[in-house]
Amino acid sequence: MTEYGPGPVDRRLPTDEARQLMTLVRDLAAREIAPRAAAEEAAGHFPRELFTLLSESGLLGLAYAEEFGGGGQPYEVYLQVLEELAAARLTVGLGVSVHTLSCHALAAYGTKEQRAEHLPAMLGGGLLGAYCLSEPVAGSDAASLTTRATRAGGDWVLDGTKAWTTHGGVADFYTVLARTGGAGAHGITAFLVPGDAEGLSAAPPERKMGMKGSPTAQVHFDGVRIGDARRIGEEGQGFAIALAALDSGRLGIAACAVGVAQAALNEALAYMTTRRQFGRPLADFQGLRFMLADMATQLAAGRSLYLTAARLRDEGRPFTKEAAMAKLFCTDMAMRVTTDAVQLLGGYGYTADFPAERYMREAKALQIVEGTNQIQRMVIARQLTGPEGR
C-alpha cells in the first residue's frame, strides 16, 4: 500500500507545491490510515477522527478555491491524492470523494453570500458532507425521484426518503435533490440541509459486502423545514446541478479504483517475491509473472485515463464522455486486478489474514456507485452518437 509495498508510485505532478502535498499525504496515509484499516473495517468502525485530521490538514477541500478555504489544487492533483488515500483505505478515499461531491453544488451554483457563509466550514472547518440523490425506487433513473420540497411562506418543507447515502447518519450537512415542480428532470431543485435539522433521521447502515467501515444508509426527511437561503441555484435547476457534480464525482471513483488496484498489486508483488515453491520464489514462474504484467499494464492504463479526463476538466473543456470512460474502465480494471491478486495469493488470498480479499470486495462496490457501469456505457454511447430515437 503506497510506500506500503514495493514502493511509491512515480507521479508526474505539475508543481513543487503538489509534490510537497503528495509527500504529506503519503506520510499521513502510512502513519494514520493504513495501519488501522484491516481491524477497523472488520469491526465496521467509521473513522470520523481521520476525517477531522484530513480537514485540519487541508485535504477535504483540495479541489476548491482558496478564497473559501479550499486548497486551490487542479483536479489532476486532487485525484492523485484520492488515489493515495484509497490505496491506504477505501473508506477514507471514497469518503473524501463523497465529501467533495457534496460541496460541488454550493461551490459551483451558490450565490456569493451562500458560499461565504457555508463553504469555509464545509471545506476546512471539520465538517463532513453527504450527497442525497438516489431513492429506494429511483436509482439509475434519478429523474424520477419523489422526495418533495414544498414552499411554506419563506421556507421549504422536505418530505421523503433518500437511499444509498454514504455518511448517512454521521454527516454534518446533506446536499439534497428534491422535487419542487412536476414530473421529470425539470421539476427538481437542490438544497443544503444541516445534519441536525429537526425531522431528519437515518436508518441503520446497510449491511454491505465490503467497505464495512463506511456507513451507507437511508436518510428520512419528515417535515424538515429550511429557509429559502438554503436553496442552491434556481428552482428546477437541481437535476442539471446533480449531473454536473456527477461528472466530477465519477473521476473521484475512478481514482479510488486505481488506488485499490494499486494496493492489490503491491500486496501480490510482496507475496510473490517472498513466497517460495519448488525451491524458488513464485515470481520466478513465467505464468505468474505474466499475470503481474497484465495487472500492472491495466493499472497504468486506468491511471492515464482518469488523468486525461482530469486535465480536460482543468482546462475548462467538456469531459463528460471521458469521465464516464474513466469510471467504467478503472472500476472494471480494479475488479479484475483484485480478483487476480486473490488468485496469486492462493489459499491465503481467500483469508482475512491478508488484505487481498478485502480489496476484491471493495472493488465490487466501485462498479456500482456514482452510476453503475451499465449507465456509464449509456453516457458514453450518447456522447458518441447523440440521444436515442433522433
Image (cartoon, rainbow, N blue to C red):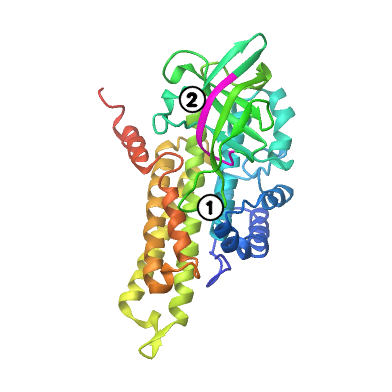
Image vertical order of residue 340 relative to residue 271, above or below: above
138 sits left or right of 9 in the view: left
- Residue in front for this viewpoint, 128 or 380: 128
In the rendered image, residue 352, in percent from the top left (x then y), is placed at 48, 67
In the rendered image, which quarter contains the C terminus? top left
Residue 361 is covered by the magenta coloring: no
Q: Is residue 327 visible?
A: yes
> Identity of the amino acid at label 2?
Ala
Q: Residue furthest top?
A: 153
Residue identifier under label 1: 212
Q: Quadrant of the N terminus?
A: bottom right
Residue 321: x and y in percent read 39, 38
Report the predominant secondary structure element of the magenta stretch.
strand
Residue 268 spot, x, y in % from top left: 44, 71
**Label 1 neighbourhood size at 10 Å, few (<14), some (14-19), many (20+)?**
many
Q: Pinpoint residue 361: horizontal percent, then vertical percent.
A: 44, 56
At 38% from the left and 70% from the top, the residue drawn is 292
Q: Specify the segment rendered in magenta.
A: 158-168
Residue at 46 percent across and 65 percent down: it is 356
Q: Which residue is mark 2?
A: 240
Q: Nearer the viewer, residue 43 or 317?
A: 43
Q: Image quadrant of residue 295?
A: bottom left
Q: Element type at marker 1?
A: loop
How far apart marks 2 and 1 lie (CA) works out to 32 Å
Q: Residue lying farthest bottom?
A: 279
Q: Outermost residue toward the front? A: 204
Disc 2 is placed on an element classified as helix
In the image, what residue type sits under mark 1?
Lys
> Is residue 159 part of the magenta span, yes or no?
yes
From the viewer's perspective, is residue 76 above or below residue 11?
Answer: above
